Image (cartoon, grey):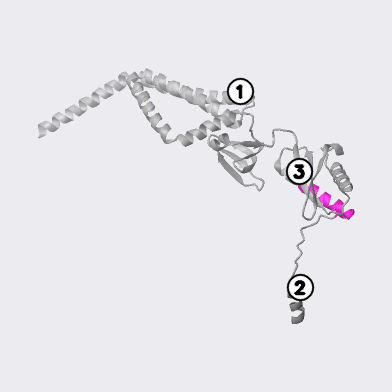
Amino acid sequence: MQEKFKKALNGMWDKLDSWFNSFVSNLPNIILAILVFITAVLISRYIRKLVYKITGRSSLQESMKQLLSQIVSIVVILMGLFFVLSILNLGKALNTILAGAGVAGLAVGLALQGALANTYSGIILSYVKQIKFGDWIETNNYEGEVIDIDLRVVTIKQVDNNLVYVPNKMVVENPIKNYSTTAQSRVILECGVAYNSDLQQVRDLVKKTIVNHFEAVENKEDILFLYRDFGDSSINFETRFWINSTSALEVAKAKTEAMILIKAVFDENDIQIPFPIRTLDFPQKFMRALRNSD
């Protein structure tokens, strides 16, 4: 028993001795590999800042600038790792790592199809010019200001100051209404007046009120005024005019202001905005019975 124990102990010491000798003989290569890796990390940080600074002069989205700088940084670090493995004579290990990475990448790709789709869509949204930070958009039944685009979601700030996080894939695959692609937005206001109203006077008052209170409207010809139909209790009209804003919130404010002004000018000129009236017609027998009961 002692003989076996001594033999095993000697084998262990021989193994440790060979490892130590191998470590000492490869010590210069190990030190060089460490220096190469540290240099690669430092260079990657510098190049990352440089790429971000260069892309900062372009019209790319903030998320796209960060993505490009990160990709370049990772590529530099990977190149440093390849040099390290080459210095340490680990070519076979490198081949094994690459083979394993391919199999693992396939498995991860199948498992993360949704996440990868959002990442790819995020790259597309970061590159296209149809949507950018500060735009007021409507997509997937949500409307608001775009405040961020990352590799997972588009963040929209709604009128009520709540944030909505819409997955990038849904934004790419569904229609987007961008209110900020033009310099102006149109305000559409619908109303109705009583049947005894002077329709020519109504039209003139509405146009004059809008021209006097909205800077973007220079004259009455810039306003579209249309009588739509004869309603149950009113003659309905629609007026349209432009304002110098691309925000849906500003459109809503302008519409509110126009309603207040038009209501005030109608009151001054005894023009009524009627509301539906219901007339109840009771049978005569019912009315006689009701009077007799009194």
- The CA distance from mark 3 to mark 1 is 44 Å
Contact between marks 1 and 2 (CB within 8 A): the answer is no
* 212 in relation to 128, above or below: below
In the rendered image, the residue lying farthest to the front is 285
In the image, 106 versus 28, the foreground residue is 106
Amino acid type, residue under disc 2 in the picture: Gln
Q: Is mark 2 on a helix, strand or loop?
A: helix
**x, y percent for residue 244:** 77, 37
What secondary structure is marked by label 1? helix
Write the residue at 31% across / 18% down.
25
Mark 2 or mark 3, whichever is nearer to me: 2
Disc 2/disc 3 C-alpha distance (Å):
47 Å
> The disc labelled 3 sits on which kind of residue?
Ile
Crowd tier of the residue under label 1, counting other residues whose Cα lies within 10 Å: few below 14, some 14–19, many 20 or above:
few
Look at the magenta stretch and give its main secondary structure.
Answer: helix
Q: For this view, does 292 lie left or right of residue 144?
A: right
Q: Is residue 260 magenta?
A: yes
Real-space CA distance between mark 1 and mark 2, rounded to the nearest whole angstrom: 89 Å
**Which residues are the magenta region?**
255-271
User: As rendered, which of 116 and 271 lies closer to the eye?
Assistant: 271
Which mark, residue 284?
2
Within 10 Å of disc 2 (Cα), the crowding (few <14, some 14-19, many 20+) is few
Label 2 vs 3, first from the N-terminus: 3
Mark 3 or mark 1, whichever is nearer to me: 3
Q: Give the image quarter of residue 34.
A: top left
**Image: 165 above or below 2:** below
Among numbered discs 1 and 2, the one appearing first in the sequence = 1
**Residue highlighted by disc 3:** 188
Q: Name the residue under label 1.
A: 54
94 or 8: nearer the viewer: 94
Image quarter hosting the C terminus: bottom right
Q: How far across and how far down the image is residue 175, in percent?
A: 61, 36
